[in-house]
Amino acid sequence: MIQVKSEIFLLNQLREGNHTAFNIIYKQYYVMLCTYANRFVDLEDAKNIVEELMIWLWEHREDLLIDISLKSYLFRSTYNRVLNLIAKKKVDANSEAQFCEYYLNPVIFSDDYDLHELLNKVDEAIQNLPESYRETFIMSRLKNMTYNQIAEKCGVSSKTINYRITQALSILRVKLKDFLPLILFLLKDSALT
């Protein structure tokens, strides 16, 4: 009964924007939730899921309706986010496989000139990105660095890196339209060789 009252008090304080209440929740549940999520996904993904959940919790604190215990709510939310990530990765893998099957057909590039011209367009579009987006994009897509590695190198958070890459991809999608998936695949493949 005491734990239920303290949990209700903590949630009420959180709803009112009390940073101390949020920090208590974060410190109490972060490691447990990461460990739980890590049962299903790798540790980096687990940490990202829990961090995003905690950010969501803070951003939606005023509208938060929890009809079960906070612990149950957080574990259920983590589990749902894990399932969403797994489903997204499965869709991405299927899409990439279908894309490769269709677009890497030798008929698309009948000679090296077409491929060379396409790669020049990609390079030009990448070079025209804002500097921070370009550097982040190159480290991620061409040097195969993780968001955390890039964040450490740039001295910013991994969320900032995620934002920069999202913005870079958005700009490139507009400039390169339907060719972007093919281009990214070819660039990623050429960076490995």
Image (cartoon, grey):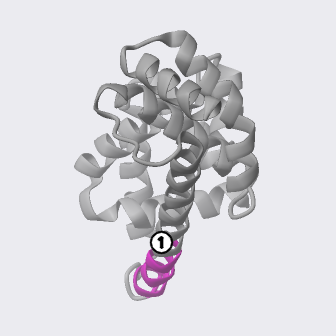
Give the residue at x 48% y 58%.
184
Local SS, label 1: helix
Residue 122, above or below 150: below
How far across and how far down the image is residue 115, in percent? 44, 67
Residue 57, above or below 17: below
- Front residue of 102/56: it is 56
- The answer to which quarter of the image holds residue 60 is top left
Residue 160, above or below 85: above
Residue 193, above or below 123: below
How far across and how far down the image is residue 26, in percent? 62, 27
The quarter of the image holding the C terminus is bottom right
- Front residue of 132/126: it is 132
- The answer to which quarter of the image holds residue 86 is bottom right
- Front residue of 167/124: it is 167
User: The residue under label 1 is which amino acid type?
Assistant: Asp
Whether residue 113 is visible = yes
| Residue that badge 1 annotates | 112
How far across and how far down the image is residue 154, in percent? 63, 20
Label 1, residues with CA under 10 Å away: few <14, some 14-19, many ≥20: few
Query: Which range of residues does the magenta coloring cover?
Result: 93-106
Give the residue at x 48% y 29%.
8
